[in-house]
Image (cartoon, rainbow, N blue to C red):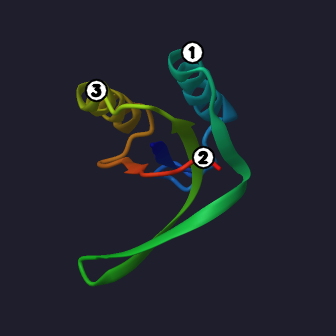
Amino acid sequence: MCIQILLPVLDKRGHPRAYRLFEDVQNELTTKFGGVTAFINTTAQGRWTKNRRTVHDDIVVIEVMVKRINRAWWHRYKLSLEERFEQETIVIRALAMQLL
């Protein structure tokens, strides 16, 4: 499985977040899973509708590969990220994959 974490680049005031926040996540995931891939220099753009308004956000994607998903651990980690990044919701998704 490939776990992707979508993290916002800007804080609520529109200022770039400290690189240290992203580096902390990379270090934590490397320690826990043995490796990480972070798409930091090429941000992605998220766009969605909220209260009939289009909202957008620049995000970085951080990925780890896991054999099994420990949902309890990922739930706790998601809550931790939401607090650190001051977000209502951080998207963490699991994608099935096959190594070639």
Q: Which residue lies furthest to the front in this view?
A: 100
Residue 52 appears in which quarter of the rendering? bottom left
Mark 1 to mark 3 CA distance (whole Å): 16 Å
**For the point 60% across and 20% down, which residue is it?**
34
| Residue 31: image tag | 1
Res. 92 in view:
yes
Q: Name the residue under label 2.
A: 99
Q: Is mark 3 on a helix, strand or loop?
A: helix
Q: Name the residue under label 3.
A: 76
- In the rendered image, residue 45, in percent from the top left (x then y), is placed at 57, 68
Q: Which amino acid does label 1 sit on?
A: Thr
How far apart marks 2 and 1 lie (CA) works out to 22 Å
Q: Label 2 is placed on what type of residue?
A: Leu
Give residue 48's position: percent from left, percent from top. 38, 74
Residue at the far bottom: name it.
52
Identified at 50% across, 51% down, the residue is 97
Residue positioned 30% across, 28% down in the render: 70
The three-letter amino acid code for the residue at tag 3 is Arg
- Label 3–label 2 contact, CB within 8 A: no
| Image disc number at residue 74 | none
Check the image and name the residue furthest to the top: 31
Toward which corner of the image does residue 83 lie, by quadrant? Answer: top left
Point 66% across, 39% down: residue: 37
Are there few (<14), some (14-19), or many (20+) residues within 10 Å of tag 1?
few
- Tag nearer the camera, 3 or 2: 2
Viewer-side residue, 85 vs 90 = 90
**Above or below: residue 49 compared with residue 100:** below
Dot 3 or dot 2: first in sequence order is: 3
Question: Of label 2 and label 1, which has the lower sequence position?
Answer: 1
Q: Where is residue 71 in the image (x, y as percent from the top left)?
A: 26, 32
